[in-house]
Amino acid sequence: MDALKVSAKSNPNAVAGAIAGVLREKGSVEIQAIGAGALNQSIKAVAIARGFVAPAGMDLICIPAFTDIMIDGEERTAIKLIIEPR
């Protein structure tokens, strides 16, 4: 599963469109966020995406988890949100 990487400067509407597109194509999507601002934008995007896919009868669930990722040779802990239809 490919991960969408969200930053504090990401546009929630654009991320929501990406979430909806990947959900329709692959059935689930993973979002990675490092920091409070990035997590805030991610949650906003999930809420917006829910509105995008609801008319098609798709209800979303969000499973939060931690993951370790490498950035510039340094290991960082990120929040991972797994989005799937219910």
Image (cartoon, rainbow, N blue to C red):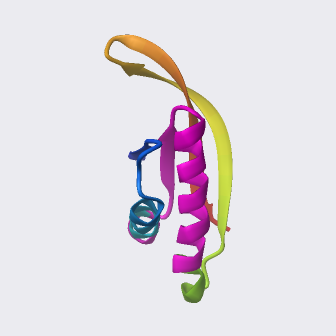
* Residue at 51% from the left image edge and 38% from the top image edge: 33
Hey, which quadrant is residue 83 in on the image? bottom right
Residue 20's spot in the image, x, y percent? 45, 69
**Measured along the vertical axis of the image, is residue 74 above or below residue 7?**
above
* Residue at 56% from the left image edge and 32% from the top image edge: 35
| Residue 60 falls within the magenta-colored stretch | no
Residue 17's spot in the image, x, y percent? 41, 68
**Measured along the vertical axis of the image, is residue 23 above or below residue 8?**
below
**Measured along the vertical axis of the image, is residue 30 above or below residue 56?**
above
Residue 54's spot in the image, x, y percent? 60, 81
Q: Main secondary structure of the magenta part?
A: helix
Q: Nearer the viewer, residue 57 or 77?
A: 77
Q: Nearer the viewer, residue 84 or 7?
A: 7
| Residues in magenta, as a range | 23-52
Residue 38's spot in the image, x, y percent? 52, 42
Q: Nearer the viewer, residue 20 or 34?
A: 34
Name the quadrant of the C terminus.
Answer: bottom right
Task: Tell whether 19 sits left or right of 47.
Answer: left
* Residue at 58% from the left image edge and 43% from the top image edge: 39
* Residue at 54% from the left image edge and 86% from the top image edge: 56
| Residue 48 falls within the magenta-colored stretch | yes
Hey, which quadrant is residue 13 in on the image? bottom left
Task: Tell whether 11 sits left or right of 81.
Answer: left
Q: How many marks?
A: 0
Q: Residue furthest bottom?
A: 55
Q: Nearer the viewer, residue 81 or 27?
A: 81
Task: Tell whether 85 sits left or right of 4.
Answer: right
